[in-house]
Image (cartoon, rainbow, N blue to C red):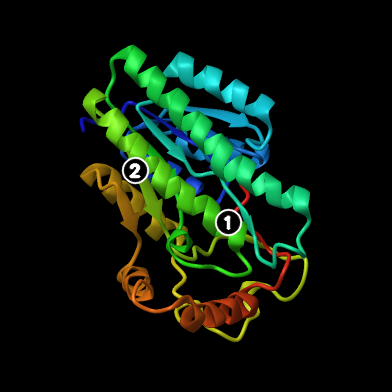
């Protein structure tokens, strides 16, 4: 793939999206950054405008009207790199968490990502441009994940959709990739309704296999450059997922459930940028 001219990143007001914006700016790729937090986006724009052109759009992609606005931008500007990073999940049993909030997980993680991917693919085909549509999934997509059922299921969809859509887009010189990070610790990532901040918990970040957003951004860039369809970040997660394929769920899920509740009590919000 030749050098990208313009990248669109959703969920860019924190975490992986923010780190990826910095990385792409360092490679002189112009940016359209979207997120829910106008102030953070403006601060990022001020920082990166010294390197590249940056456009900012503050919007909540759970809302269909916001997605209409963004699809118009995609059709007009035709970014040749689109990173669907916006997404969130809620830790806790499905019967306990508010149902409307759970349906919003599906609206953002599935509906918004699918809509923006298809609109981006159509825009690139119409413009006769090559490009990459990159969807941020999760290592949780590969396992039975109690207390995180909707999030992990939505990410399993992201993987399957991305692989299928990739085969459809290849003849046009367009790739659709899905990246699968594990636990990524960010400044705004964990906003608890209960319990202590993550840093005060007894288990170390290393023991939990936590990665930095900068590490995740570099892994995404490596995947884009190498056009790898599915990429699970870090050897620890790759081996854990391979091992899980040979073990029955009844051996694995109790440990996962215990780890989840130790790490983040019910009601914690994950990665809503």
Pinpoint residue 22: horizontal percent, then vertical percent: 42, 44
| Residue 11 visible to an observer of this rendering | no
Q: Nearer the viewer, residue 235 or 7?
A: 235
**Residue drawn at the location 40% of the way across and 18% of the way down:** 123
Residue behind mark 1: 151
Pinpoint residue 96: horizontal percent, then vertical percent: 77, 65
* CA separation in Å, label 1 and label 2: 19 Å
**Residue drawn at the location 51% of the way across and 37% of the way down:** 113
Could you tell which of marks 1 and 2 lies nearer the N-terminus?
1
| Residue 171 visible to an observer of this rendering | yes
Q: Nearer the viewer, residue 250 or 78?
A: 250
Classify 59 as above or below 91.
above
Quadrant of the rendered structure where residue 193 is? bottom right
Classify 80 as above or below 62.
above
Badge 2: how crowded within 10 Å, few (<14), some, or many (20+)?
some
Pinpoint residue 128: horizontal percent, then vertical percent: 28, 15
Asked which secondary structure carries label 2, the reply is helix
Classify 105 as above or below 140.
above
**Residue drawn at the location 56% of the way across and 49% of the way down:** 14
Disc 1 + disc 2, Cβ < 8 Å: no
Pinpoint residue 72: horizontal percent, then vertical percent: 54, 17
Asked which secondary structure carries label 1, the reply is helix
Residue behind mark 2: 163
Classify 25 as above or below 96.
above
């Amino acid at each position: 793939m030749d050098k990208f001219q313009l990248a669109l990143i959703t969920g860019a007001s924190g975490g992986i999206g923010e780190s990826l914006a910095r990385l792409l700016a360092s490679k002189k790729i112009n940016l359209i950054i979207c997120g829910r937090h106008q102030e953070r986006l403006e601060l990022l724009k001020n920082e990166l405008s010294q390197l590249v052109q940056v456009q900012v759009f503050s919007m909540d992609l759970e809302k269909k009207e916001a997605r209409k606005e963004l699809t118009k931008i995609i059709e007009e500007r035709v970014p040749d790199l689109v990173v669907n990073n916006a997404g969130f999940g809620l830790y806790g049993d499905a019967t306990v968490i508010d149902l409307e909030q759970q349906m919003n997980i599906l609206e953002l993680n599935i509906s918004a990502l699918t809509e923006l991917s298809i609109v981006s693919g159509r825009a690139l085909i119409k413009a006769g441009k090559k490009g990459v549509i990159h969807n941020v999934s999760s290592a949780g997509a590969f396992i039975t994940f109690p207390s995180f059922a909707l999030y992990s299921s939505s990410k399993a969809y992201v993987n399957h959709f991305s692989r299928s859509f990739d085969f459809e887009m290849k003849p046009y010189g367009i790739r659709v990739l899905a990246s699968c990070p594990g636990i990524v610790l960010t400044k705004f990532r964990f906003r608890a309704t209960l319990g202590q901040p993550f840093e005060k918990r007894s288990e170390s970040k290393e023991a939990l296999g936590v990665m930095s957003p900068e590490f995740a951004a570099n892994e995404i860039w490596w995947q884009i450059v190498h056009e790898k369809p599915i990429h699970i970040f870090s050897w620890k997660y790759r081996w854990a997922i391979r091992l899980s394929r040979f073990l029955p769920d009844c051996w694995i899920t109790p440990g996962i459930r215990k780890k989840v509740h130790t790490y983040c009590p019910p009601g914690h919000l994950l990665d809503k940028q």
